[in-house]
Amino acid sequence: MSNIVAQVNPADIDMLTRLIEGFDHLGIVSTLDRQQGLVVIRGTADTLPDLLDILDNLPFSLTIVAQE
């Protein structure tokens, strides 16, 4: 399992969830702290490159805090 911890504007959490799940369920987004906009995106080693590509091209700002 590959986890990406990221921070987004709290208003963008729902859109992030919809986008990631819309890409053939490449990952699952869970909110860690809604007020701070912290989320974890759970994927697999196979989906990680695609997830990172998507995250780099979102229509809103996202900062990767950690990759596990």
Image (tube, helix red, strand yellow):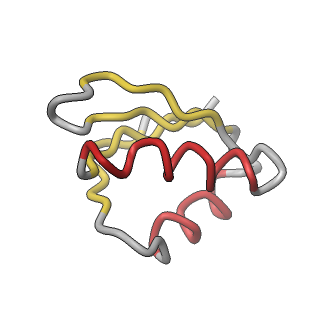
Which residue does the image show at 15% across and 34% down from the upper left?
A: 36
Question: In this orientation, which residue lies closer to the viewer: 2 or 7?
Answer: 7
Q: Where is residue 44? Give x, y as percent.
A: 70, 38
Residue at the location (17% across, 29% down)? 35
- Percent of width and height locating residue 58: 47, 71
In the visual, does 60 lie left or right of 3? left
Q: Relative to 61, is 15 above or below? A: above
- Quarter residue 51 falls in: bottom right
Horizontal side of residue 30 vs 12, given as left or right: right
Above or below, comparing residue 29 to residue 31 in the picture = below
Occupied quadrant, residue 45: top right
Instruction: Note whether 32 is above or below 51 in the view shown.
Output: above
Tell me which residue sits at (32%, 22%) in the image: 32
In the rendered image, residue 43, in percent from the top left (x then y), is placed at 65, 38
Q: Residue furthest left?
A: 36
Q: Quadrant of residue 28?
A: top right
Closer to us: 50 or 68: 50
Indicate the position of residue 29 as horizontal and vertical percent values: 54, 34
Tally of numbered tags? 0
Relative to residue 37, is residue 27 drawn left or right? right
Instruction: Locate the N terminus by quadrant.
Output: top right
Q: Outermost residue toward the right? A: 24
In terms of depth relative to the viewer, which is nearer, 43 or 11?
Answer: 11
Tell me if residue 57 comes above or below residue 65 in the rendering.
below
**What residue occupies the far top of the structure in this picture?**
32
Q: Residue 1 vs residue 46: left or right?
A: left
Q: Which quadrant would the C terminus be assigned to in this image? A: top left
Residue at image position (48%, 64%) is 55
